[in-house]
Image (tube, helix red, strand yellow):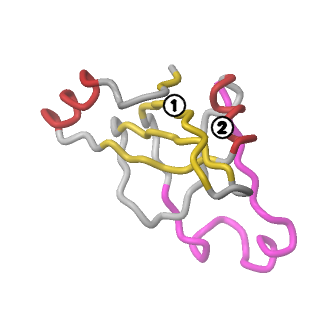
Amino acid sequence: MIHAGAVRVKSLRNAMESNIKIIKKKVWPDYFKAIVSGKKKFELRLNDFDVNEGDTLILEEWNPKTKEYTGRKIEKIVTYVGKFNIDKLFWSEEEIKEKGIQIISFE
């Protein structure tokens, strides 16, 4: 569901009652379109904020060229959070630097 204005009151009330957080994050236009279409069902983010299953992400479209929000946003419920340190993965640091890492989404 895309929201042009404020976050739904019901979601905010539920979050306050159950310690679920509302987290706002910028999303670039191409990624935002993929999320809205339902094709992209994941986020790769730096682990610089606390997020847990059940939290609500408010993903706000951000134009990196104009450095402004477009006004479009979408609300998503977090269903899974996987956290890892780069030095504790299955592959060596050399392999990661050479080949990179990919995220695979599935249903």
24 left or right, relative to 106:
left
Lower position in the chain sequence, tag 1 or tag 2:
2
36 left or right, relative to 18:
right
- What residue do we see at 42% from left, 29% from top? 5
- What residue do we see at 75% from left, 53% from top? 102
The residue singled out by tag 2 in the image is 32
Q: Residue 75: x, y in percent?
A: 46, 31
Up the image or down, 43 lies above or below 16; here it is: below
Q: Amino acid at mark 1?
A: Ile
Numbered disc 2: secondary structure: helix
- What residue do we see at 20% from left, 27% from top? 14
89 left or right, relative to 54:
right
Q: Amino acid at mark 2?
A: Phe
Which of the 4 image quarters holds residue 33?
top right
Towards the viewer: 57 or 53: 57
Q: Quadrant of the C terminus?
A: top right
Disc 1 vs disc 2: Cβ atoms closer than 8 Å? yes
96 left or right, relative to 54:
right
Towards the viewer: 79 or 32: 32
Up the image or down, 57 lies above or below 66; here it is: above
Q: Residue 43: x, y in percent?
A: 59, 46
Q: Which mark is residue 74?
A: 1
Numbered disc 1: secondary structure: strand
Which of the 4 image quarters holds residue 53?
top left
Up the image or down, 31 lies above or below 64; here it is: above
Span highlighted in magenta in the image:
83-107
Badge 2: few (under 14), some or many (20 or more) residues near its Cα, within 10 Å? many
Q: Residue 72: x, y in percent?
A: 56, 33
Badge 1: few (under 14), some or many (20 or more) residues near its Cα, within 10 Å? some
- What residue do we see at 51% from left, 20% from top? 1
Towards the viewer: 100 or 62: 62
Farthest residue, direction left: 17
